[in-house]
Image: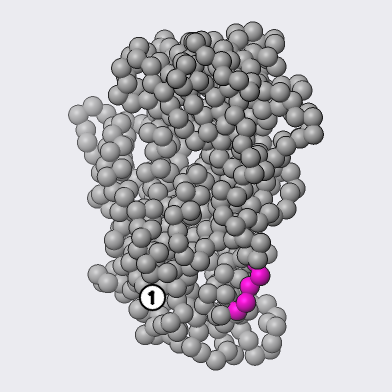
Amino acid sequence: MRSASTPFRPAPGTDAPPPRRPGTALLRRLLSCAFVAVLTAAALPTTPASATIGATISYETIVSHDGTELKAKVITPTGVEGPHPLLVMPSAWGTPNLLYVGAAAKLARESGYQVIAYTSRGFWDSGGEIQVAGPKDRADASSVIDWALENTDADPDRVGMAGISYGGGISLLTAAEDDRIRAVASLSGWADLAASLYPRETVDTQSAELLLIAGQLTGDPSDQLTEIEREYRQGNIQPALDIAPDRSAATRTDAINANGTAVMMAHAWNDGIFPVGHITDFYEELDVPKRLMLTPGDHATQEIFGAAGLPDEVWESVGDWFDHHLRGQDSDFDAEGPVHVRPNNGNGGWTSYPDWPSVTGSTEQYHLDRPSTDWFRWQSSGAMEPEPSTDWSYRFRTGVPTPAESGTVMLSGALQQFFDIPTGVLLPTVDRYRAAVWTGPAHPDGVRVAGTPEATFTFTPSAENQSVYVYLYAIDRHGTGSLLSHTPYTLRGATPGEPVTVNTELAPVVWDVPAGHRLAVVVDSMDARYLDESDIGDRVSVSSPEGAPARITVPFA
C-alpha cells in the first residue's frame, strides 16, 4: 500500500490531463478581489517626505519578444529628475502584478525608482502559457527592460530585478543572461529546482500539488507543463527533472559571476517549497557582491506583507540593497558581514557573519548506540554518545506513520514565525517498532544549534525502493520536542538485503535550545509531506558497521 499522500492517477487506458477544476473562474475572481482589496489599500498615496515627490501608477500592456502581451503596473516617480534607476519585478507563481504595487510605490516615492511590476507569462491577465521559468520567461524579463528604456525615463546603466518565489527565480536566471542587470533581490526563490522538488530523490508531494493546483486555477499551463503533470501523476518524475537544469541558477553561477551582478537572497528556515539548504550552497558559490538573510517563516511568509507596502525588515533590506548598488549610496548594513540570520525560535535578533560557514562556531559528533524498544525509558532509548558504538543492528517496520513529522507546507513555518509554535513531537509516543529513536544528554545552560547538521546511517532495505526520514529534535524533560531540522532520503534501485551507507545533510538551522533540554534523533519511514516509497509489511534495518559508525554531527554557534 502506498502512502495516503500518493497523488491521483488517471483511469486506466486514459492519458488525458486532469480537467480544469470546477469553479476555476469563480475562484480566480475571488482571488483577484482579495488582491485588489489588500494591495490597492496598501498602495494608496501617503504624505510624501517632500510635497513635490510622489508616484503615479498606470496599467500597461507590454508586447514581449514573441508578441505575447504582458500586463504590467508601471510605477513612475514624480517630482524627481531622471533618469531613474529601474526595477523590474516579475510576479510570483499564481499571482498578478498587483503583488508588488505597495512596495513598488514606496520605492518610487521614497527613492525615485522607476518600477515595472508585471504578471508573469501564462498567469492572470498576461498572455501566453506557463513556462516554469523557461527561456521565454527570461526573454520576457529582458523585453520588459527594453520597453522601460524606450517608454520611461529609466537609466540603462542602473537596472535591477527583484521578486518573490517564481519572480525571484526568474530574476536570478535572467541576471545570468542579461548583463544589463546590475543587482538582483530574490526573496523565497530557488537556485536548484531539482533539489527543491525532489530532495534526496524523494518527491515533495505537498509542494508539487500546491504548485500544480495554483497553476490550474490562476493560469494556462503549457503543453510541456501539462505533460509533466500527467507523467507525475503516473509516478514518473523524470520529465520534471529533465527541465530542471535549464531552470536552475545553480547551473549558471559562472555566468552570474562573470556579469558581476550583485545578488541578495532572503529565505525562511522552514520554506516548505524551496528548502533552505540549496540556497546556502548556491550562496557560497557566488563570487559577486552578495547578501543572505535567513529568518523564521515558511514560503514567502516573511516578505508578503512588505510587498504590500507594510513595514518589513526584508523589504527595507531590499531597498538598502538597491540604493547601494543602483544609486551609489553608502550602506553599513553589511558592516559585520553579509550573512544575516535570526534564530528560528524565540525572540532572538539578527546576527551577522562574513560567510555562511562562519555561522557555525564548532561541531559535536554524537555516536549512536543501538536503539531500545522500551517506550517508558525514552531518555535512554538509544544513546547519543562521544565514542563510536558499532556492530549493532536495529530493524523497524515501514509503511505506518509515527508522530514524527516535518509539518505542513505553508502552515507549519508560518506558525513558527508568527506564534513561535514549532512542529512538535511527544517522543514517548513514537512507536519503537516503526522507528529508531536516540536521545542525548541534557544541556544544563542551553545551547544554540547553528549551521547544517549531518548524519551517517547504514540502512538495509527489504525492497528496491524505500524511504527514510531523519529528524533532529530539542526535547524537554517531559519528552515534548520541537523539530529543529529534518531530511528525507529515498533509497532507489537498492538490492534488498544489501546494506547501503548514507551520508546526508539535514536542513540548515539556527535554534536556541533552552536550558535543560536535550537533543534527540528519530528515523522512520513515512512523512505526510512526501511521496513515501514505504509499503506496509516491509522492514528496514539501521546498523553501525565498524567502517561507518552511525552518528550525527551537530553544529553549534
Quadrant (top left/top right/bottom left/bottom right) for the N terminus? top left
- Residue 73 screen position, x and y as percent: 47, 73
Query: Which residue type does callout 1 highlight?
Result: Arg
- Closer to us: 513 or 154: 513
Image quadrant in which you'd find residue 350: bottom right
User: Which residue is nearer to you in this view: 491 or 274?
Assistant: 491
Which quarter of the figure has residue 364?
Answer: top right
Residue sitting at x 33%, y 73%: 143
| Segment colored magenta | 329-333
Q: What element carries label 1?
A: loop
In this rendering, would 415 be left or right of 224? right
Q: Residue at x 45, y 52 (%)?
A: 282
The residue positioned 55% from the left and 40% from the top of the image is: 452
Q: Which SS does the magenta portion mostly show?
A: loop
Task: State the residue in front, 41 or 378.
Answer: 378
- Establish if 261 lies above or below 551: below
Q: Is residue 132 visible?
A: no
Using the rendered view, name the quadrant where residue 436 is placed: top right
Residue at image mark 1: 180
User: Is 161 placed above or below 400 here?
Assistant: below
